[in-house]
Every structure is written in C-alpha cells, then in structure tokens.
Image (cartoon, helix red, strand yellow):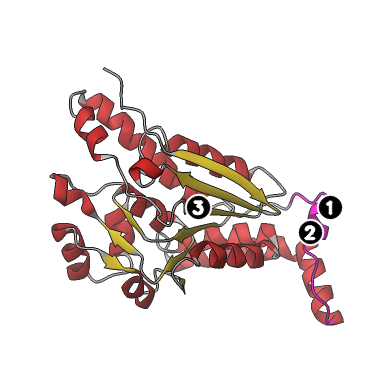
Amino acid sequence: MGASPEFTTAVDVERRGAVLLLTLNGPSSRNAIGPSVYPQIQAQIISAASDPFIRVVVLSGAGGFFSSGGNVRALQDSAKGTLADATINTDKLNAMVKAILESSVPVIAAVEGGAAGAAVSAVLACDMIVASRNARFTVAHVRVGLSPDGGVTHFLRSSLPRQMVMQACLLGEPLSAEKLAAAGIVNVLASDGDALREALALAEKIASGPPQAIGNIKQLVNAAAESDIATHLDREARAINLARFGQEAAEGLSAFLAKRRPDFGQAQRNGEMQEKVDP
C-alpha cells in the first residue's frame, strides 16, 4: 500500500518583488495539508534561500482560512498501512518544519480564520505570525485519538505556561489569536480579512533590510535557546565582526552618517558573498 493518499491542496507560488508568497489552496478540504503538501512547502522554502532576489517568504491560506491540518479521512486510510509508511509521513512533516526554521530567509505566517493540527506546527515554526482577530489555533490531535506532532508541543511550551499547553492539547480547545498575541507568539493582530495584507506589508519592510545580517539574526535567535551564554557570546561576536567588513555594514553606516535611507541592495549588486555565522 502507498505511504499516503493524495491531498487535493495545491501550493500556489507567487513572486511579489522580493517577497515569495506561498498560498495553500484546497477549498474542498479547507486547505488540508499532508504528506504530498509538506515537500512542496519544503522545496519552495529551500529554493527561496538560494535565490538572491527573494528576501522574505509569506505562507498563507486561500479562502479566508489558513488550513484545517491533516485530512481526517486520509489519516484513517493511512492507518491501513505500516509503521514504516507512517514514519515516512511524519518525516516529511518534520522536514518541512526544519526547512522553515533553518532557512536564512525569514518566513511569515499570515493566518486568517484558523489553523489546526499540522498546520499549527507550520505556523509556529515561522519567524513571525500575523493573524486576524478571529483566528483560532487548534491542536486537535486528541479529538481523533492522536498525540501532537510536528514540534507543536515544543513551540507552545517554549512560550506558554505548562498548564495552558496541557489544556490546549488534552482538550483540543482552540487558542485564540488574541491570547497568543498576549503571550508574544502572534506578532500582529489584523482586522478580519486583513492578515495577508498586513503580512505582506511586514514582509516588504523586512525585505528592505540587509539580507545577510537578517539571515544571521535569524540563526542567532534560533540558536540562543540551545546555547550557553559563553558559546553564544562567541557566536554573536564572530557574526558582527565579519559583518563589519561587509558591504551591508558599509552602506548602513554611510547612510546613517549621511542621514539618508540605506540601499542594502547595493551589497547584492556588488556581488558580495559575506560569510554567514554557523548556528
């Protein structure tokens, strides 16, 4: 038996200047995601990191809803397979999550309506989250006799009290965007229907910044939780000292002293290949 049934959700890809917009599009399943969708997102994230003209990725859902998570019927069918098949499927989910986390390009989630199951993992892996005020985040696995996967318990526990995470996971109760914003997980609360617009505006602002420095910032922030202070001080020192001699710093410092807006694209046009900090 095959490793997993096919999902009908497509990943629409659109370039908007320096921003790559990825849209989950499966209206019949509320943009359900699964083993055929994870590699598509992973591939686009990896490709964006190697494209010098893409500075930010925005992940969204079509039809006023981010994603309903895993397709329940497909999950039921997959139980007729083997443990090896199931492992392949979770490996694909984990690879997508790791791609979002490890990419040098910032990834922003634009959440309208809600996200459930594996979609919550994808959202929480993103570097910033813009959500509409009506959005709900549901760790729904327990409702169908499963435990969470895709790193969702790790992401939630790193920002929320243990008892709050237990309530969300043991009962499958939705977490509101407003509650997650109060906890610092959601960065921007948008009016209903405006999450994507707000996310794109945020992406364009980030895209105007220095890409090498931004990539290093992402790596440093992600590595901080796993590092002792001595190791992290050395890592930060190496990153900033390398940057001092780069075109981005030259442009940024010159612009500051001249009281003008910096043009960080100049470093790219000069063909600079500044070394990135090793996480």
Could you give the CA–CA distance between mark 2 and mark 1, rounded to whole angstroms?
6 Å
Which residue position is annotated with label 2? 265
The segment highlighted magenta reads: 259-273
Q: Residue at x 28, y 50 (%)?
A: 117
Query: Is residue 129 rendered to the left or right of residue 157?
Result: right
Name which quarter of the figure residue 46 lies in.
top right
Disc 3 marks a residue whose amino acid type is Leu
Residue that carries the numbered disc 3 in the rendered image: 59
Type of amino acid at the residue the image marks with label 2: Gly
Please determine whether, in this image, residue 249 is positioned above or below residue 59. Answer: below
Residue drawn at x 57%, y 51% is: 278
**Which quadrant holds residue 134?**
bottom left
Q: Quadrant of residue 78?
A: top left
Q: Indicate the secondary structure of the residue bearing disc 3.
A: strand
Work out whether 1 lies above or below 179: above
Q: Please identify the quadrant where the N terminus is shown.
A: top left
- Which of the two discs, 2 and 3, sits closer to the camera? 3
Looking at the image, is 94 positioned above or below residue 115? above
Residue located 32% across and 65% down the image: 158
Cα–Cα span, label 3 and label 1: 28 Å
Q: CA distance from mark 2 to mark 3?
A: 24 Å
Determine which of the numbered discs, if any, sits on residue 115 in the image.
Answer: none
- Magenta stretch holds residue 173: no
Helix, strand or loop under label 2: helix
Q: Residues within 10 Å of mark 2 (few under 14, many from 20)?
A: some
Tag 1's secondary structure?
helix
Residue underneath mark 1: 269
Q: Nearer the viewer, residue 134 or 211?
A: 134
